[in-house]
Amino acid sequence: MHAPVLQATTGLPCGAASRGRLREGRNALPGDLAIWFFIFAELLVFGVLFVAYAVARRSQVELFNSEQALLDRRSGLINTLVLITSSYAVACAGVAIRAHRLRDCAGWLLGAWALGAVFLACKCLEFSHDAGMGMSLSRNLFDMFYLALTFFHFLHVVMAMVILSVLLRNLRLGRYSASAHTGIETGSAYWHMVDLVWIILFVLVYVLH
């Protein structure tokens, strides 16, 4: 399923009709239309998992409350701020490419990639801390949901960083400009989706009691 996403960010020339459609319709979704089907599918999967978590929590409130108290909320908050900042960087990259400021665009994308790496590093430390407390998929229902949700999201951040790497490579090869940057908009849309999912996950798993 992920192959089409990478294909969507290769920066291959778009058809004249696609470019015209993006220019004509101010309300048109940014990026390649295919990425939005993919994003909606991903959001549906996460949505089902979030609903399942909420239902499970209602059945074992005391267990979930006690296990949530063991989570490192400070690390979760830091990761939330990191991803929000990275989304800002990706948005600035979009502004830069539309103004044909290629170097600025590359800098913002690289900054977003670096922040993604910070997120992964923090999450790895948190996973290590969780393992030290004995958390595992088989220990209890909360641990199963917490580890499954956060690791699934972790993989999406990795995927988003791969996409940013492709965008940076294509930018260096001169495949994007102020008039042809669908690939950057496509990759940005995916990055923002990953950020949105984490914010919901953080509130649902780390904050709500």
Image (spheres, rainbow, N blue to C red):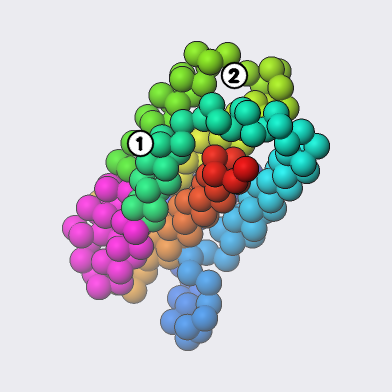
Question: Which circle, 1 or 2, is nearer the viewer?
Answer: 2
The disc, 1 or 2, on the residue closer to the chain's N-terminal end is 1
The residue under label 1 is 117
Give the image quarter of residue 152: top right
Reply above or below: 140 against 175: above
- Which of 56 and 29 lies nearest the eye of the viewer? 56
Q: Are circles 1 and 2 on residues that touch, CB within 8 Å? A: no
Q: Is residue 154 visible?
A: yes
Residue at mark 2: 135
103 is within the stretch colored magenta: yes
Is the N terminus in the top left, top right, bottom left or bottom right quadrant?
Answer: top right
What residue lies at 64% left-to-right and 58% top-to-bottom? 40
Please provide the residue range marked out in magenta. Answer: 88-113
On the rendered structure, is 143 left or right of 174?
A: right
Residue 107, how many percent across, how many down? 22, 53
Q: Is residue 79 visible?
A: no
Residue type highlighted by circle 2: Met
Q: Amino acid at mark 1?
A: Ala
